[in-house]
Image (tube, grey):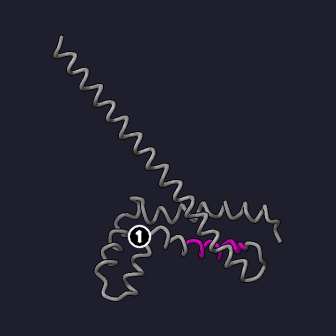
Amino acid sequence: MMGLGLQVAWLLMLGIPVACIAWTVTHEDLFREPRQYCQRKCVEARSLVRRKFFYLFTCEYCFSHYVAAGVLLVARYKLLYQDWRGYLVAFFALVWVANQYMSIYNRLRLDIKHEQVEIKSDEQKVDIHKVDDRKAA
């Protein structure tokens, strides 16, 4: 059995690919067309099961559960317990960690976008002042 420190280190490391896969599939342009198809089917499907199935590919939180289950199957990672309870605890902990990573990433992207908008606004103000100075001269 791994020590608790090593288990936590594994948890933090396994959260990275879970977050990466879930975010890429549900947000990035690489999967835009399949995601748009799923968004349409999520609204248009008649049965509840079909709507929920297609919704899975549009929600990073929902999709992260399936990715985490896949990662646990491949890695055979258990947390705190050596029996089935270890998989259960690891599953929910891994989903939580991955969603924390995605929240941090989303916040970072918003901050970067906000800074870019501010820079562009400042550049436009400078350009306007240059034009006004030329007119005055």
Q: Does the magenta stretch include residue 68?
A: yes
Q: What residue type is labelled 1?
A: Thr
Q: Is residue 126 magenta?
A: no
The residue at which mark 1 appears reads as 58
Residue 135: name its quadrant.
Answer: top left
Instruction: Report the residue at 65% width, 77% height from top.
Output: 73
| Residue closest to the far bottom | 47
Instruction: Report the residue at 28% width, 28% height from top.
Output: 125
Q: Quadrant of the N terminus?
A: bottom right
Left or right: where 9 falls relative to 121: right
Residue 118: name its quadrant.
Answer: top left
Q: Which of 35 and 121 is in front in this view?
A: 121
Q: Where is residue 130 in the image (x, y as percent from the top left)?
A: 25, 20
Boundaries of the magenta span: 67-78
Instruction: Report the residue at 36% width, 74% height from top.
Output: 38
Report helix, strand or loop for mark 1.
helix
Q: Position of residue 78 (x, y in %)?
A: 73, 74
Instruction: Report the residue at 44% width, 70% height from top.
Output: 59
Residue 137: name its quadrant.
Answer: top left
Q: Position of residue 124 (x, y in %)?
A: 28, 31
Left or right: where 115 falls relative to 99: left
**On screen, 99 above or below 38?**
above
